[in-house]
Amino acid sequence: MATRLWQPLGLLAVIAIAAMLFSLTVGSAQLSASQLWAVVQGQGDALAGTMVIDLRLPRGLSAFAVGGLLAVAGALMQVLLRNPLADPYVLGLSGGASIGALAAMLAGVGGVLMSGSAFLGALVSTFLVFGLAHGSGGWTPSRLLLTGVVVAAGWGAVITLMLALSPAERLPGMLYWLMGDLSYARAPWPPLLLLMLTCIVLIPLGRSLNVLARGPQQAAALGVDVRPLEWGIYVAASLLTAAAVTTAGSIGFVGLVVPHMLRLLLGNDQRLILPACALAGGTLLVLADTLARTMIAPEQLPVGVITALLGVPTFLFLLYRSR
Amino acid sequence: MFILASKKAQYRGAIGSAVFSSARFSGARLSGWPLLGFILCSGLASSPLHADETRRCVMDDRNREVCLSAPAQRIAALSPGATELTYAAGAGNQVVAVVSYSDYPPQAQQVESVGSHTRVDLEALVGLTPDLVIGWVTGNPTEQMETLEALGMPVFYIEPRTVEAVAGTIERLATLAGTEAAGQEVADNFRDGMTALAAEYSGREPVRTFYQVWDQPLMSVNNEHLIGQVISLCSGENVFGDQGRLVPRLDDEAVLMANPDAILAGGMGEENRHWLTHWEQYTNLNAVASDSLYFVPPSLIQRPTPRLLEGTQLLCEKLEQTRQKRKDS
Amino acid sequence: MSRLVTQDLIFDVPGRSGGTALNFAIEPGQVWGVLGPNGAGKTTLLHTLAGLNSPRSGQVLLADQPLATLRRRDIARALGMVFQERLDGFPATVLETALIGRHPYLSLWQMEGADDYARAEAALEKLDVAHLRDRLVSTLSGGERQRVAMATVLTQAPSIWLADEPTNHLDLHHQSAVMALMAEQAAEGRAVMMCLHDLNLAARWCDHILLLYPSGEACWGPRDTMLVPSALERLYQQRLATVEVNGAPVFVPVQ
């Protein structure tokens, strides 16, 4: 039974590492595998070293972290809302983060302040939705979903307003952020650590999530503490999404398509799906980002465009095959 | 993480005591990687200048002092305006990287592009090993510029917002590039030309002017904008001069209410006059009645470069035509 | 083996005030049938007994401990519930569905072992759905899905069974099989309570009956004292004719 878990996970891990290595060798400056090996060993020229260590490695690791975070958050949202069409942004979280980030851009600040602002916006949105969705006797998934959708629409209106009133020269930066962009991701370790920590915490809860996916009453009857678990999933999914959006803007499709694809291929055991999402989501985004920065080099594409272009046909193909 | 730390240490050792530069920021953030020293070494090795050239320090438009130990030999200009100003400063031969739409002077189109000014291909840029990066204060993405600074590259931000600043920027760039003589000449020509135009056209009868930056959405400029300053120099009265935003977005109604005597517009590209034909339907506009719809090529007036002189000349002459028509009618 | 006792229990039906306070005990070995027309609150009662709904007043005791003070996990080891309706949002196989019955017994880091799989397979066999073990539950017929639900609880192996209309969707053969299974569980010392809409099944298989009236009124007791035609006619608002078959009464609705 344990091999059931480790085989697909092992395969995904190997693919993930291959994707990372691929992203390190590919770029505007062509590096051969031997040059890459030289850099790793500490020899090789300084320029290649800068390329790999200072530019590609942080970017690749950030891409992996963000992709993994979004995919896991998407899987959690789908369990929480018992809806295979849920994605991490369905509850309005990315809208709140966007407002925080755009406000920082309008004020002319960047870097840590902007990340902090985006994160704050995400948290405000999370608590707002949770508070509003509270009916008498707690919230139900459908109430949460409806509230989230409405709040997301509200944030969308505010974002449009900000774009309309922004000085012309700030617009491209804002649009890139909204489309999802990894071109300046330099601090991959916080999101990466969060991803690893989350997987470690979620795997033992995986079976409870399997049971929860059958419905709250069935789950309660089988010994699951439904309310605390749902709360926990909501907070976890929000935290993961907030971290992802803060790092790279709102990249779409990864959180929806990756969990779904994995379910079609691997079944529905969350103990397998959650870590698989982390690996597969990370791999997808690393490859997408590699494409985004090399496809029409030196022009740079936002990675959200690539995830959509890659994700949608792949998903349709898998859906077709699984019939 | 451990790979990073050990790599830095090894590069530090490999470089030794080569000449390196530092950029002292007002925020006192540490920089000056030995990597930069390596880059400079390779750059200097191919230059005709000697290592004992005087150190030069110049203030940029973000009030940071940027110091180079020798004139920059490999300049990356990260906006079309920066490219044009660098060439104007006489440093055209030292430019190794530009961004898209850097179309003037024509030689700049042969230089390698590293993306657009809103999203730079950092790898391509770093691969060209520049020793000076010219950034635009409001145009380039903050995070990418921070990455460049963290890699130890000297970044010099410019954005001339006044007529005098155009000349001053050319002089500063010339200092950084070691082309002081050529740059000074261009700057002086520009200054003298603008002064002459000011002397000739200021104090004349004001002409209510509307300058159209864009048509969808309709955009104009206020008095703080460089074009607004040029209009004032030509004794024009910018009808949207006291708008709060530098580039306000308006609608046709606002223009009809303001009823300017002259409408000046560029267009998309250099030969497109159709923005002006849009106004001809409003026959009650003073500008239409007196046939004062003028086309000014945008490249001559929308960039804070020496070509602004030509554009100012054109604009002043157009307004003068309107004055003449007024006298004759 | 545990017993389920109610103390002055009034369960909460929205829009209905009060009702008879319920004071009965489901002892090991007993098979209780809950009868009543639609809307009487049979499902709500069962959910309250399982601790899924809060009662309006009174309490439920599981093994002489108030349900409200017990952890869900501990309740799940002693009490199993066959629901009337199921939520199958995500695809799952029949075997996986039966296997979740082992959830209350496995710790967080534990994976299902050979013993758990064996129990699940045996349960599927018992409910005559073993041949469907790798089918997706969404592709099953109503009756097959119902039997899988029972297999899940059988895998859970609780000492108290609460079943909400377990014979729904089942053909005659499987109806009898399921009822026989319930009787077998009781014979093995477990306690069973079922909501039934089929009067005759209750008459044949249950030894205790609880009658729930839409007004909230209720009465309970051994089968023979409860299955009085006049009470049943009042319950269902339907005239009945009584016949005896094989020693057990059969009630037939008449005009």
Image: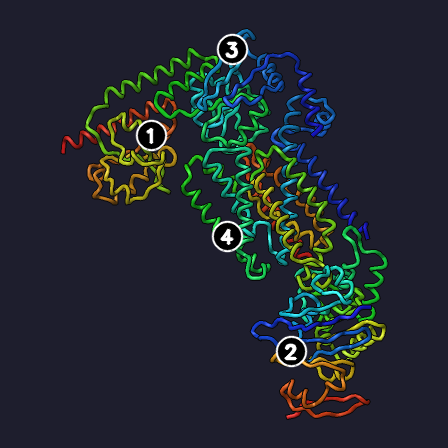
Q: Residue at x 27, y 25 (%)?
A: B233
Q: Is residue B155 left or right of residue A82?
A: left
> Tag 3's secondary structure?
loop
Residue with the mark numbered 2:
C20
Q: Is residue C22 left or right of residue B258?
A: right
Please, which chain is the residue tagged with disc 2 on?
Answer: C
Dot 4: few (<14), some (14–19), or many (≥20) neighbours within 10 Å?
Answer: many
Whole-percent x, y for residue B136 in the image: 46, 27
Three-letter code for the amino acid on which mark 1 is drawn: Glu
Residue with the mark numbered 4:
A151
Image position of A315 with respect to B162: above or below: below
Location of residue B253 by image quarter: top left
Check chain identity for marks 3 and 2: say if they share one. Answer: no
Three-letter code for the amino acid on which mark 2 is drawn: Thr
Please, which chain is the residue tagged with disc 1 on?
Answer: B
Q: How is the image coloured?
A: rainbow
Residue with the mark numbered 3:
B55
Three-letter code for the amino acid on which mark 3 is drawn: Arg
> Tag 2's secondary structure?
loop
